[in-house]
Amino acid sequence: MSVVLALGAAVVFGSADFLGGLASRRRAALAVAFGTQLAGFVALLVALPFLPPATVTPRDLLLGALGGLFGSSGVVLLFRCLARGPMSVVAPVAALTASVVPILAGLVQGERPGAAAVAGIAVALVAVVLITREGDEVAVTGERARADVRVVATALAAGALFGLFFVCLHGTGDDAGLYPLVGARLASIPFLALLITTRGGNLREAVTGRGLPTVVVSGVLDMTANILYLVALRHGLLAVVSALTGLYPAATVLLAQTVLDERMRRTQVAGLAVAAVAATLVAV
């Protein structure tokens, strides 16, 4: 069950990031992040009445809120990177630290996956590295190289923030339902609104105007992926769920290749094949 949910989260996360990155090429990344967080929160509030009762504690909400601050900061950084660099490179780079942080946290907390799962986690990380390979024609000197280094460093930071968000969700109680995600949005939305207003932006413009449908769909998909991930954590180990969810760049890369005509390198194709092997190993 946890394997299916984690893989589902990976596909939906990758799709949401692609759309968010696409919107960020037309609008400010901060405005897109605010719009996606708000759209996802509305979708969550619509779904809550139809779900079974939950027992939520202040600790669950606080961990959710802390995770929301980490996650929303990561979203802003990621969307900026996706707007400036090739999506087929940025997404896998961010996924690397997004996977490593919770995997290490799970091991530190005493999780001991089986031999096949450990092998699957290692293979999943190899897959992410392969998908990340950009090719020989990327400039390595001058302004382009410096820009590439900044984008990669920012993507790694975004992934680490996502990883901390996942760790916070893991710390919430099994009976809390989806309410940790409510806590996350109650923290992230005001936080992003404050950033927009302090930087001279307009909140109304952030939720209207060009590209709004793309922002809304991205936000709903992102919330759907968060729900799948949280439910997967209820049924599986943090290290395993995070490793599988970390395969989400496969969806982003495929969409970038199809919609934006970004070329996929041989190593990236090999990475997608290795990702399938990783999923199989973890599922054993």
Image (cartoon, grey):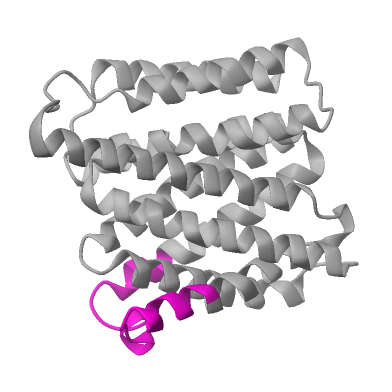
- Looking at the image, residue 276 sits to the left or right of residue 50; the answer is left
Quadrant (top left/top right/bottom left/bottom right) for the C terminus: top right
Left or right side of 235 for 97: left
Q: Quadrant of the N terminus?
A: top right
Q: Residue 224: x, y in percent?
A: 57, 58
Residue 54 picture quarter: bottom right
198 falls in the magenta region: yes
**Looking at the picture, does residue 131 appear above or below residue 256?**
above
Residue 244 drawn above or below residue 278: below
Q: Residue at x 32, y 37 (%)?
A: 152
Q: Main secondary structure of the magenta part?
A: helix
In the image, residue 71 sits, relative to residue 8, either above or below, namely below
In the rendered image, residue 117, in percent from the top left (x then y), is placed at 70, 18
> Where residue 73 appears, x then y in whole percent?
49, 59
| Residue 247 visible here | no
* Segment colored magenta: 191-217
Q: How many marks?
A: 0
Q: Residue at x 72, y 52 (%)?
A: 169
Relative to residue 108, is residue 258 drawn left or right?
left
Residue 252, magenta (yes or no): no
The quadrant where residue 34 appears:
bottom left
| Camera-side residue of 200 and 84 | 200
Residue 102 visible, this orientation: yes
In-front residue for pair 10/87: 87
Residue appearing at x 62%, y 21% in the figure: 121
Q: Residue at x 46, y 79 (%)?
A: 193
Residue 40 image offset from top left, x and y in percent: 53, 69
State the image quarter where residue 67 is shown.
bottom right
